[in-house]
Amino acid sequence: QVQLVESGGGLVQPGGSLKLSCAASVFTFRVYPMSWYRQAPGREREVVATITSDDFTTTYEDSVKGRFTISRDNAKRILYLQMDSLKPEDTAVYYCNRARELPIWKWGQGTQVTVSS
C-alpha cells in the first residue's frame, strides 16, 4: 500500500516562505504525474500545482502562480513545494498525491500551513 508522508508546514508571517516535502513509498513514483493539493477549513480540497513524470512540466492554480514552485526528485521519491510570498489565504492543510486524472492513492496526514501575523 502506498504511503505518502508530507512535512515542512508551520506558522509563517505573510510574505514568508516554506518548503514542503512529500515522501512516497511507491517504487514506481517516477512514472506518475504528481500534484500538491490543499484543503482550507470549510472548503473542498483543491489542486495547487502539478508536475509531469517525464519532462517535469509544471502547472499551477492561478492564485499561486509566480509564488509557488513544484519540483520532484525521482531518485529519492520526494515531491517538493517551495512556497514564497505567502498570504493568509494560503492557510490550509497541504497534501500530495497523484495528479487527479489518475486514481488517487490513500491520502497522507497532510501538513498544516498557517499564514498569520
Image (cartoon, rainbow, N blue to C red):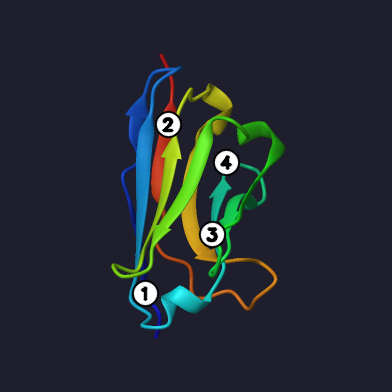
x 52%, y 37%: residue: 68
- Residue under label 3: 56
Decide which of tag 2 and tag 3 comes sooner along the chain.
3
User: Mark 4 — residue?
Assistant: 41
Give the spatial CA distance, label 2 vs label 3: 28 Å
Name the kind of residue labelled 2 in the image.
Thr
Which amino acid does the dot numbered 1 rest on? Gln
Relative image position of residue 88 (x, y in whole percent) = 53, 23
Kindly identify which residue carries mark 2: 114
Label 1 residue SS:
loop
Q: How dense is the environment of label 3, judged by Cα within 10 Å: few (below 14), some, or many (20 and up)? A: some
Element under label 2? strand
Find numbered disc 3 in the image and state the secondary structure of the residue it sits on: loop
Between 64 and 44, the one nearer to me in the picture: 64
Residue beneath the point at 41% across and 65% down: 108
Which tag is nearer the camera, tag 2 or tag 4? 2
- How busy is the neighbourhood of tag 1: few (under 14 within 10 Å), some, or many (20 plus)? some
Which label belongs to residue 3?
1
Amino acid type, residue under disc 4 in the picture: Pro
Q: CA distance from mark 4 to mark 3?
A: 31 Å
